[in-house]
Amino acid sequence: MLKPTRRSAPRVAVAITLAFLAFISGARPGMAETFAYVGNADSNDISVFKMAESGEMTPVQTAAFTGVDKPGSSTPLAITPDHRVLIAGVRSQPFLAVSFAIDPKTGQLSHIGNGPLADSMANIASDRGGKFLFSASYGGNKVALNPLNANGVAGEPKQVIPTGLNAHAFLPSPDNRFVFATNLGSDQVLSFAFDATAGTLTPSDPPVIKVPEKSGPRHFVFHPNGKFVYLVHELNGDVAAFAYEAKSGAWTEIQRTTALPEGFSGKPWAADIHITPDGRFLYASERTTNTLAGYKVDAESGKLTAIGSVPTEKQPRGFHIDPAGRYLAAVGELSDSMTVYAIDQSSGALAKLKSYPTGKKPNWVEFLNLP
């Protein structure tokens, strides 16, 4: 019979000392590190920040695009589901997907290689399996699918599909069975069935989800429970909530509200939309007023209740929420900086913490927990 062993006093003392040091340093054994990646269009690079538990950001790297000379109009980013590769879309000729390996310890980026894109792509996204890259061309009125090689570099486009005017976002459903493309200039969302094994897209039946004329559907996000979709409209500032039917991929509108602050007058120019990982709060950015609008989300009905708007960076084209749902980081194309906000965990209200310089014309933010 085995007798229970006692821990020696020196070993216990060492453990206590290490625990105390971890406490005073703010670190915990096995704690994931959080990193933020900012795509900068005019400086053709990515700003990498490490985020502390307090929300404080520390710059750790500026990763340049190897083999790219001319800046594009924006720099969309995508991270593969295994967190090993970050891909940046270059919107100057030749149109490229630039792939970087992500160091699991430091979060820093190392260039792997470049792959071809079918056009100047406003949006890129990995499928849920990390084997394919979806992209949408605003000026080219098309969407495309590229295979991703084992090292995370995009291969030649496998499918290039004409769309209505101004394809803007092209993202998979939570179960990877459908892919949806907004057509900002045609006021519609296209629906495709996706065969993740073969890597092929087929128009759904029906193939189109119509939205109000001259609303300009732009970006959208799924609720974490998979039952709802939220769509921001660039041209009228609307935020629409849809019930999502996973089996058929059908969208049914249940509510329409606005991202515009109270008393707004002028031409709306809404941009981005994101939801907290727990699905309790939703946020949208509006560029004419340089504001972020917040909403409480009802998990049962999917409907939104406005929290209010806060001022943010100048021309806030992109923002994102950290994986813990505690902080939001927004970048300004015309301010060349990023502001971090604390998210009140009971109300969803945003409280400004601090601003940080980025590269030139930042427009995209991705967060990542490592390892």
Image (tube, rainbow, N blue to C red):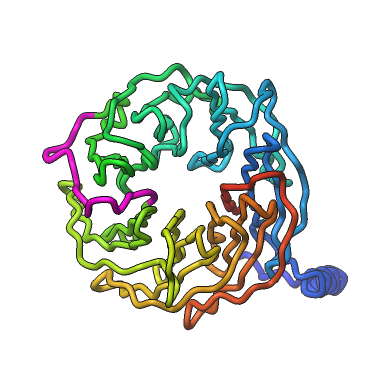
Does residue 21 lie above or below 149 as drawn? Answer: below
Q: Quadrant of residue 142?
A: top left
Q: Residue drawn at (26%, 66%), measured in percent from left and top?
A: 256
Q: How many marks?
A: 0
Nearer the observer, 123 or 325: 123
Q: Residue at x 34, y 62 (%)?
A: 239
The image shows residue 337, relative to residue 152, as above or below, that is below
Q: Quadrant of the N terminus?
A: bottom right
Image position of 331 with respect to 309: above or below: above
* Highlighted range, magenta: 202-219
Which quadrant of the view contains residue 144? top left
Query: Given the current orientation, which residue lies at the most extreme front position?
Result: 266
x and y percentages locating residue 19 in the rendered image: 78, 72
Q: Is residue 224 visible?
A: no
Single out the residue that lies furthest toward the right.
10
On the image, the x and y values in percent for residue 9 come to 85, 74
Specify the principal SS of the magenta part: strand
